[in-house]
Image (tube, rainbow, N blue to C red):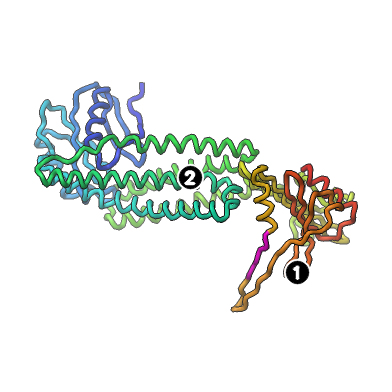
Amino acid sequence: MKSTKYRTENLLLYDYEHVEEHLSAMAAKGWRLESIGARLWKYRRAEPAKVRYAVTYIQDASQFNPGPTERQQTLEELCAAAGWEKVCDWFQMQIYCSEAEDPVPLETEESVRLEAVHRSMKRNYLPANTVFLILFLAMSAWFVCTLVTDPLRILENSAYLFIGPLLFLQSVILSITLGLYWRWYRRSSRSVAQGGPCAKPGKLQWINRATYGFLIPWTGLYLLSQLAASQKGPVIYFAVYMLLICLLGFLVRKTTALLRRMKASWGLNLFLTLLADVVLAIVLMGGLNFIAIQGGWYSGAKSETYVYLQEEWDVSPMDLPLTVSDLTAEEYSHIRRSEYDQSSIFVSRRSCRDTVREKYGRFWLEYKITQPQPWLYDLVLEDTLSPEESSLSVRGAHFSWLYTWEEVPAAPWGAEAAYRQSIDGEPRDTWLLIFPDRLAELSFSWDLTPEQMALAGEILKNA
């Protein structure tokens, strides 16, 4: 039988009444609160008993302090004399318990309680969450504006489709949470001014439950959509990322606790904790991204290579739908291939490149196959054919280029329509082939014969 257990509690810092009621109910079931972490509350098994809990607040309490402040020590002494035992603290919230039948109340002045709660909320909860709210609102506004003005940028990117609604959800949840607190504070201020008690906060647990009720299914849907599209890389990345976030939080908390045991000052503890947070984040997330790139989580595993004429070539080249060898009917000694798949549930986009070399020359081809949902086909086509300007500034000089598409005969490619790209009106060796269910954009380093054009169109049409 386990002697300890951990729970995620749906309680807010200023909701002292529900904290007291909840902890008393847990004690009646045989579980006593032992400590409160960043996300989990730790309980230890004990004999079921009727235990009274009381909550009070001290503004200068902090996990970065080298030990209990003078106010905390004074409070503990006074509470001990009155029969209250210190359990733990949660930011500025101080939690005490007593098994006495009718213990002396810790708070007797409602005005003092209200002011203590409000000072504690202003110390960390309100500033931090206000900043987060502004940030989430700004990011949500960008998401909505982009969805209206450039919908394809959102619809073709699974990460945007996943994160955008989460940003909006966080904005709503934080707005509600902060709004409910200020509503409670105003009501309590009016009640206390008239000689009454602080207002009842009401049932606030639904806020976190609603968050998890959306977050868990939405995350599951995102991961399933990636698996359905044969995108295992993003799923692996997400799983490892979440594990590293938990590890990061654990290591940062241990850093704070170690510095506290070493009696570091509040400022030094805070500085070194933030420094450890930044360094660990860079190391862990940088390492994850390095492993993801080297492991080919998004672009396919990187194969073993060798060097020939100062270039890397694949020992065992990957298979691609269309290769130089397919078009030339020749085998090459040196081959380098790459593939990048960027897909969402609305638009599938697969980019490939094949480079070969022999003593007499070096050839390459690259292509991108885009398959949108039928209802998005016209929008994708219109966006692809839109003129695009590119610019570059070098030492004060500004250069710009205009990329446009000019329609050309489609029959040699076996396509419904075909376009050739131009830069400032000069044709380049890049074509766009239009098929009933897809678009294929391709470039070559040599002039194709009519037979090669027909073969390329046939392969890309069915790839």
Could you say where residue 329 lies in the image, as x and y percent from the top left? 89, 49
**Where does residue 328 sit, x and y in percent of width and height?**
88, 52
Q: What is the crowding at mark 1: few (fewer than 14 residues within 10 Å), some, or many (at least 20)?
A: few
Task: Find residue 425 and report its image quarter.
Answer: bottom right
Image vertical order of residue 318 relative to residue 83, above or below: below
Point 12% across, 27% down: residue? 100
Q: Can residue 306 be seen in this view?
A: no
Q: Is the magenta stretch mostly helix, strand or loop?
A: strand
Relative to 417, is 7 on the left or the right?
A: left
Q: Is mark 1 on a helix, strand or loop?
A: loop
Question: Which residue in the protein does label 1 denote?
Answer: 425
Query: Type of residue at label 2?
Result: Pro
Magenta segment? 386-391
Structural distance between the alpha carbons of marks 1 and 2? 42 Å
Left/right of residue 394 with respect to residue 274 in the rendered view: right
Instruction: Report the mark closest to the observer, 1 or 2.
Output: 1
Residue located beneath label 2 in the image: 165
Q: Which residue type carries mark 1?
A: Gly
Image quarter of the C terminus: top right
Q: Does the magenta-highlighted stretch encompass residue 144?
A: no
